[in-house]
Structure formats: C-alpha cells, structure tokens
Amino acid sequence: MGGDSFEFGTTALMMLKCVMAKNCNIKCPAGLTTNPEVFDGDPRALGQYLLNIAHEVREILAQLGFRSLREARGRCDFLHLLDHPSSVGQLDLRAMLTVVEEYKINNPIYMERDFAVDDGFMAVIRDALIDKKHVSIQLPGSQLLNNCNKSVGGQLAIDIERMLNYELRKSQLPAVLEDSRGRRFLASRAVRIATHGTAGQSYGAFCNDGMVLEHTGTCNDGVGKTACGGEIIVHAPPGGSLVQPEVAPLLKVRPEIDLPCGILVRLP
C-alpha cells in the first residue's frame, strides 16, 4: 500500500526479556528501565532476532521476484484477500488497489524545525531573571499559536536547564534554587507564559521546574509529555467570542481537574 516504515519497539524489548508488565516507569520486573541490578537479558538475542527477520524478508521477496523492499513498495497487485478458516469475514478492497503511475516531486519542501516562539520567550526571561535579577516574570500579553507551532515550551525548558546548570553555574540569582544534588532550577512559578489559539503537537513538552504554561484554546496530542516539575493549565476556548484572551475576563470555572505531570484542566 506504499508504507515503508516498520516498528520493532515492543518485539525488540521482548527479545531483551521484557514481560509487558506495563509499569516501566515505576519498577520494571525485567530490569530494563528502572532495575538494572536484576537485568539478565542478552543483547545478542536482539541482534539475532533482527537478523532472522531480515533473512525471512529476503526469502519472501525472492519468492515474489523482488530484489529489495524498495521494489515491493506500492505493488498493490501482489496483495490478495485473506482466505483462512479462522477469518470472520472479508472486506473486498480490490477496487482500491489500482496501480497508478508514481508522481515524483523534484524539489520537495520540508518543514524545518522552528523555535522562534521559544526563542522569543527565552530572550524576555533572560533579561528579567538574569540581567535584571527579578524573582519572577510574567510575559505580557498572550502568544497566538497554530498547528505549525509544535513543542512550544520544549526548547525553552531545555534552554533554561542549560543556562542554569552550565552557562551560569556559579551566578547567584534570586529566582534560582539548588537541590541536594547540586542541580539548579527555577523557583516555583518563576516564569508564567500565556498562549491562545490551537497549540500544535507536544505543547509544554519537558515543562521544567518553575515554568507555568497557561493556554486558552485547543491542543493537539502530546501535551506535557516528559514534563518534569512545571505546570500546564489548559482553558477551554470561549465559544463564539471575538474577544482576544489577553483582554477577555476569565471564565467561571468548575472544580479543577488535576492530571498527572502537573497538567491542570479547567472546564467552563
């Protein structure tokens, strides 16, 4: 059908003695993620598994008359309906499997990474907390987001971590604290950022200590993934109003829903 991407994540872990306990982040019984002292898997088993897959794929391709997976890609004429006694039913898709001429684009346009939004946030934060040594900063107004603005806050969290623990390791700043391990981090709610519109994927990824991201509108999937200490607040968008979030009064809210990873959702 044209697919040329393959996923071996789960089966690869099982070759390393994963038991699919579904509590990887708490206590892995196989020792793959959190208990290295009990891990007794052999990486050679994973290597042999992938070699076995490669050998069998080569055999199947040879039977079909192909020299590579690239030659087999898109060859719908080699697909056939499943005919097995245990099959419940059949869905005839033969009318959809017409082989058409491939159209190749000479100069495809790819969306490159763009951290302009986070870079703008970082410039304001550095000026307030580092240069002027304020205790906290609330960025003025509200940043408009759309689907193209992906992982907003992610690069910002990384830049803050790098700045505090590498660039300004010895600087004494009122907004910066230090734990028993020597890691420097921002005080609670030292940085407050408001956004509105439609946040792209992974809004608030890696949301770090001291960060508060407050969004009014909708968000795509991956909100707050790998968040580590920060807060994310998502307000439902006001219905049918043309008033911008920075001047609109806050909605009356029902009791807050507290989700894991510091994500707070307020419903109208």
Image (cartoon, rainbow, N blue to C red):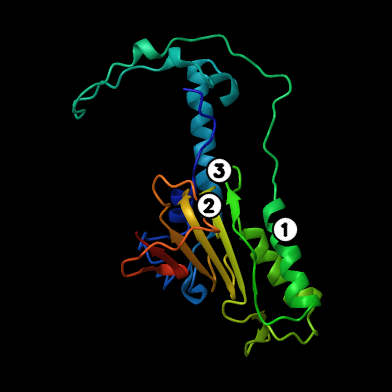
Q: Which badge, 1 or 2, comes first in the chain's sequence? A: 1
On screen, residue 120 versus residue 6, left or right, reads: right
- Residue 263 drawn at (x, y percent): 45, 66
From the viewer's perspective, tell me whether residue 240 is left or right of residue 184. left
- Percent x, y of residue 32: 49, 66
On the image, the x and y values in percent for residue 148 come to: 60, 42
N-term-proximal mark, 3 vs 1 = 1
From this view, report whether residue 74 is shown above or below residue 216.
above
Residue underneath mark 2: 244
Residues packed near mark 2 inside 10 Å, few (<14), some (14 to 19) or many (20 plus): some
Residue at image point 44% right, 12% down: 77
Give the quarter of the image for residue 94: top left
Q: Position of residue 20 (x, y in %)?
A: 37, 59
Contact flag, marks 3 and 1 (Cβ < 8 Å) = no
Q: Quadrant of residue 68?
A: top right
Task: Find the distance from the CA under tag 1 to the CA under tag 2.
Answer: 20 Å
Q: Which residue is mark 3?
A: 147
Mark 1 in CB contact with mark 2 (< 8 angstroms) = no
Which secondary structure, mark 2? Answer: loop
Q: Secondary structure at mark 1?
A: helix
Mark sitting on residue 120:
1
Please name which of the two marks, 1 or 2, marks the residue nearer to the observer.
Answer: 2
Q: Alpha-carbon distance for marks 2 and 3?
A: 18 Å
